[in-house]
């Protein structure tokens, strides 16, 4: 069946999200859960803050059919035991209707079976683990590192027109298969292959890796490790003509300041570049974070988007809002066009969910990031 895209104009977003849904509803708040990394090695405290701010906005406007939305966020501190306990408590004790805005590095891999068994949907703000994109009951609102990698390789070969595209990566445990799949997708689309594929890059002296890349004549290097030492040594090696394309985690003000003058450094972003609040979709996000004094990061963009799409789907439910009715609504929903990302977002009935594709790119200039004009680069097959 052909799906019809539901455009969501930026200026009308607030009105659309605060309107009440149809149906009779029940008393009490609509409980929504999230598993977040607030402490520990992967910290995203701004994400549940952003989700809560969106829900409070809806509640002040009357809620959903008169019911308020209550966010119950649990910090797993990137601890596997805490993550599994948090998910079970939210599902069994708190009886949440869905999980919205999770931002844990370990949640998806640990809890995917739990979500499927409970027949509950999760809409993470930040999908990190490959399991976030290969599970029937999880659909993140970001492209994730693997679809992002495909877009970055595509940008290097098709937009920048480089023949010798190279990869220099630090591979985290469990991510090797996702990286290989991303490279294969790029090769299938473009018919091209990597000139160098090095997935052994460490955090020590970058010289051996850079010498290998230079010797191979790499014109573009897609890279995901340390920034400061890497670029300092790349300049020493005379690699000013190479386009270094960094993963989204490098897109920070601090990293822009570490890139020496004369080096060509670009970074892919998962949402509209957050450093420019005037970009489509960013106006809404900026209002939420500015009004609530929330840290401005790309992850907070994911928090706002996850909450927004959840509310929009919630509004389509006729009758009581329960876990069963929410899951049904997401499995049967129409795609939502959200201007902060490159493709429409949809949950749907599939066994895997990676609906957001593409990337926008920023360039390091004078110690800051400048947004490049191409718009979202979404890999496309010829014909």
Image: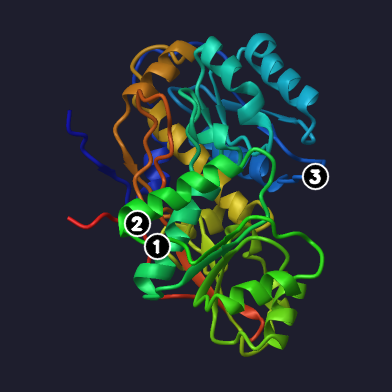
Mark closest to the chain's N terminus, 1 or 3: 3
- The residue under label 3 is 41
Residue at left offset 55%, top offset 25%? 68
Q: Tell me: 281 left or right of 175.
A: left
- Which quarter of the figure is the C terminus placed in? bottom left
The residue indicated by pointer 1 is 154
Front-lying residue, 318 or 1: 1
Q: Residue at x 48, y 59 (%)?
A: 282
* The image quarter in which residue 221 lies: bottom right
Image quarter of the N terminus: top left
**Residue 22 visible in rendering:** yes
Q: Nearer the viewer, residue 117 or 214?
A: 214
- Residue 118 point in image, percent of width and height: 55, 11
Query: Which one is earlier in the sequence, the residue at label 2 or at label 1?
Result: 1
SS for dot 1 = helix
Measured in 3D between alpha carbons, the distance from the residue under mark 2 to the one under mark 3, in whole angstroms, is: 32 Å
Q: Position of residue 359 (x, y in %)?
A: 44, 59
As displayed, is residue 234 above or below residue 133? Answer: below
At mark 3, the secondary structure is loop
* Dot 1 alpha-carbon crowd within 10 angstroms: few under 14, some 14 to 19, many 20 or more: many
Tell which circle, 2 or 3, labels the residue nearer the N-terminal end.
3
Residue at image position (61%, 90%) is 262
Query: How far from the left and from the top, in percent, is residue 18?
Result: 43, 37
Does the residue at mark 2 contact the one at mark 1 (Cβ under 8 Å)? Answer: yes
Number of other residues with Cα within 10 Å of mark 3, as a class: few under 14, some 14 to 19, many 20 or more: few
Q: Is residue 319 above or below residue 20?
A: above
Q: CA distance from mark 1 to mark 3?
A: 31 Å
Give the Cα separation between the discs numbered 2 and 1.
6 Å
Q: Which residue is disc 2 drawn over?
A: 379
Q: Residue at x 62, y 65 (%)?
A: 251
Classed neighbour count for the residue bearing mark 2: other residues with Cα under 10 Å, few (<14), some (14–19), many (≥20): many
Q: On the image, which quarter does residue 11 sit in?
A: bottom left
């Amino acid at each position: 069946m052909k799906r019809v895209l539901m455009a969501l104009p930026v200026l009308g977003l607030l009105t659309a999200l605060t309107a009440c849904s149809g149906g009779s509803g029940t008393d009490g708040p609509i409980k929504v859960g999230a598993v977040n990394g607030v402490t520990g090695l992967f910290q995203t405290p701004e994400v549940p803050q952003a989700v809560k701010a969106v829900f409070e906005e809806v509640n002040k406007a009357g809620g959903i059919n008169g019911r308020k939305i209550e966010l119950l966020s649990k910090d797993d501190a990137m601890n596997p035991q805490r993550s599994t306990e948090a998910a079970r408590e939210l599902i069994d004790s708190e009886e949440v209707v869905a999980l919205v805005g999770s931002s844990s590095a370990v949640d998806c891999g640990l809890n995917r079976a739990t979500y499927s068994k409970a027949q509950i949907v999760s809409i993470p703000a930040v999908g990190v683990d490959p399991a976030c994109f290969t599970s029937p009951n999880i659909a993140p609102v970001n492209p994730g590192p693997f679809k992002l990698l495909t877009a970055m390789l595509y940008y290097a070969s098709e937009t920048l027109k480089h023949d010798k595209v190279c990869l220099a990566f630090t591979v985290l445990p469990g991510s090797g298969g996702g990286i290989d799949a991303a490279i294969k997708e790029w090769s299938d689309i473009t018919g091209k292959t990597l000139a160098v594929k090095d997935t052994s890059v460490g955090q020590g002296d970058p010289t051996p890796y850079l010498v290998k890349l230079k010797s191979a004549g790499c014109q573009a290097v897609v890279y995901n490790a340390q920034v400061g030492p890497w670029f300092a040594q790349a300049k020493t090696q005379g690699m000013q003509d190479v386009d270094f394309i960094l993963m989204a985690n490098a897109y920070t003000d601090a990293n822009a300041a570490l890139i020496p003058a004369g080096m060509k450094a670009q970074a892919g972003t998962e949402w509209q570049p957050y450093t420019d609040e005037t970009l489509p979709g960013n106006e809404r996000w900026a209002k939420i974070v500015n009004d609530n004094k929330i840290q401005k990061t790309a992850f907070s963009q994911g928090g706002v988007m996850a909450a927004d799409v959840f509310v929009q789907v919630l509004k389509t439910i006729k009758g009581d809002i329960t876990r069963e009715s929410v899951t049904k609504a997401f499995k049967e929903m129409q795609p939502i066009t959200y201007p902060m990302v490159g493709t429409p977002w949809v949950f749907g009935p599939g066994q895997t969910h990676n609906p957001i594709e593409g990337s926008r790119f920023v360039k390091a200039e004078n110690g800051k990031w400048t947004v490049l004009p191409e718009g979202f680069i979404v890999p496309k097959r010829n014909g």
